[in-house]
Amino acid sequence: MRTTIHSLKKGEKAIIKDFDIDTVPLKLLEMGCLPGNMVELLQIAPFGDPLYLNINNGSHVAIRVETAREIEVEIIKTNLW
Amino acid sequence: MVSNRNINVALIGNPNVGKTSVFNQLTGLNQQVGNYPGITVEKKMGFCKLPNNVKANILDLPGTYSLNASSIDENVVIELLLNKNDKLYPDVALVVTDVENLKRNLLLFTQIKDLEIPTILVINMADRMEYKGITLDIPYLEEHLKTKIALISSRKGFGIKELKKLIVTYKTISTEPCLNASSIDPEYFNTLRKTFPNQLLYKLWLVITQDVNFLNLDRNEIRSSFTKSHSDLKRLQQKETIKRYQFINDVLKAGMKIDETVAKDFRSKLDRVLTHKVWGYVIFFLILFVIFQSIFEWSKIPMDFIDSTFASLSTLAAEKLPAGVLTNLISQGIIPGIGGILIFIPQIAFLFMFISILEESGYMSRVVFLMDKIMRKFGLSGKSVVPLISGTACAIPAIMATRNIENWKERLITILVTPFTTCSARLPVYAIIIALVIPDTRVFGILNMQGMTLMLLYLLGFGMAILSAYILNKILKIKGKTYFVVEMPNYKLPLFKNVGINVIEKTKAFIFGAGKIILAISIVLWFLASYGPGEKFNNAEKIVVEKTKDKPLSKTEFENAVASQKLENSYIGLMGKTIEPAISPLGYDWKIGIAIISSFAAREVFVGTLATIYSVGGSDNEVTIKNKMAAEINPTTGEKIFNFASGISLLLFYAFAMQCASTLAITKKETNSWKWPAGQLIFMTGFAYVVALIAYQILK
Amino acid sequence: MDVQEILAFIALAIAVAFLVRKFLWKKKSKKNCGDDDCGCH
């Protein structure tokens, strides 16, 4: 199973890898959701949907899970010390 | 070239950057809101005097994230920018950005630059730079973005003078694009360039990828010469976006520095509470409760004032103007008609004031976030919350507020069900019926029966809205893509000026949208009530004299009797009598029938019509109307007309029936079709009939 | 019919004309958003 934005836990950060251009709206890309950019899951709405993200360090947006599921990411592991 | 005409300045930018504030700062109150021809997008224009005696027309375009439009609003932006012949085509474009979101805001900026219009970069919210640890190298940015920059704070009011000076110098601003976007597919664009050498390359690109009306070139002509599949085009758009962001990242890396250690973050702290699983909803409902309470309390005094003022005006007109038909029309039809419209202004204005404050502060996006999942179960969107709440004031501005719902199906369902929510116009009807048939007692010592009934009616309205949404969602087979992408802006203190101007706009929408229709129908109704065919109407006086020759009446009684006779035999009276067989199973008589018919103009007309029917002399004393109504007996059964059963039946009828011509008009406009308002009328009224029928038959 | 009546009936005519235009006029519109998206992907 691939890791998508939907897999993120609250507070986790990840780098965007890839997505299906037919299901992810262009508008989201224009908000900064591009491969190589960072995404952080800030809040999850009650009932699990939608998701409140910080994209590309500055763009605060909420998207529905059905869109989040289409965006593949690589989670940034924080080194615990 | 010496030009005496005003220069055109277009304000473009992302939503939530304070573009409206900039607009307000530049134009003051010299602004007007209209409509773009053919579509329901608001056109905001204003006038501004610049230095050196230059006058400017400022056009506030709808906020958009890029020139790739995803809604009608955004389409307007491109259509204007592509058409040099449009009289509003800008001489200079002001791209308004927010210093905290510069990266994203610049995407639109680079696209505008590609259109070779002189462009000024306005960086707003400069007052927050220190707070966020941001420093900008303005000369570097100006050089690489090929523009002139104005650093302003529309909130604090600084930088505006400098901006105005900058606008005047527009002819000296470079129109060179700041990056070469066509490098994403050199072959394709070169071919395009060769085939249409006289057109701007980026313009061609926009025409190919967008659904815009391009006047000079036939879109199909372009499309057919270059066969790129739909998904190829999408891929190119993606590449374009990536390329632009690369450019922006490079420029900002050198031109902008952020000291993270200084940056403070108020937003996430507040978000944690406001979007909390439990507290989020609690706070939201508390806020709603406070809003509704305030609206009710605060509206009472102005409403009473408007009521008595128009009553006096009506009497005044009748006394001072020369006697005659026109005077009667004015004092009995037009003045009460206008009064009936204006009386709702307090409630509507207050509600929109609250909604505007919630939107300006940024809180509304959080509400949408909280409510989206729940709403979707009923075929609605999180964004349907604002229209549904607005519907408790008036459905007209509420339906207009659905314009920001991207998914057509969700938007349509919201438009169709919003009229079920209890709007202000139903309140006078509820008030008088409740006063007549619900006992004024307390249950369990604290709950007032009349108050409870009113609350139940409100809940019924909402419940019905949600239920019909659910049903419509199952029935309607409409495809629509979901693009739910909602920006969660920074929290900010609402600016009084912005809220004020917003409230005035919405209220005007109600007054002129609904007002004209209600007034026109009031005039028609007055005629229908004041004229009648045949003997029984024209010889009313003689007939009354005949009827009462054994028991002569006093002057007032005689006048009332004649008025009664006339009404019964006027056009509208005959209409009421005609439908009487259909409505008597609901417990209504022909008099109520008349009132119901007139209510199709506007629900609140019900009370005024009843007042006329029950022939109360000069002043509309509510107590007297109530007494008369309470005393009214059904000639066949010998029982009271207004009893518990018929009262409940009437309440339910008014709760569900589509009795508002203005709502039908706006639904037609917003859905651009006949069938939806027709469906509303038939379904809602039919449903109301059945429910009222059942209620009466059970309760009688 | 006296002046007042004439004026009153003119008002009526205007009102009716207005309502007819509002509700029964087939406006020429470029886009028909009846059942689907208004072409605004």
Image (cartoon, rainbow, N blue to C red):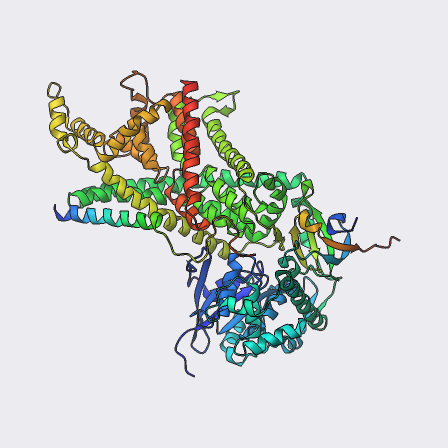
Answer with left or right where residue B635 lies relative to residue A43: left
Residue B297 visible in the shown view: yes
Q: Is residue B694 left or right of residue B326?
A: right
The percent position of residue B646, horizontal first and vertical second, equals 38, 23
Identify which residue is drawn at 38% across, 49% down.
B513
Q: Position of residue B121 (x, y in %)?
A: 58, 71
The residue lying at 53 percent from left, 72 percent from top is B163
Q: Nearer the viewer, residue B171 or B345?
A: B171
Task: Pick out the residue farthest to the top.
Answer: B638
Looking at the image, residue B340 lies above or below residue B577: below
Q: Residue B254 in the image: state x and y as whole percent.
A: 72, 73
Q: Picture coordinates of residue B374 (x, y %)?
A: 61, 39
Examine the image and state in which quarter residue B534 appears.
Answer: top left
| Left or right position of B183 against B539 | right
Instruction: Say which of B639 and B472 sits in front.
Output: B472
Q: Is residue B99 left or right of residue A14?
A: left
Q: Quadrant of residue C28?
A: bottom left
Whether residue B660 is situated above or below residue B647 in the rendered picture: below
- Camera-nearest residue between B653 and B5: B653
Q: Quadrant of the C terminus of chain B?
A: top left
The quadrant in which the N terminus of chain B is found is bottom left
Q: How many marks?
A: 0
Can residue B158 be seen in the rendering of this structure? Answer: no
Q: Residue furthest right?
A: A81
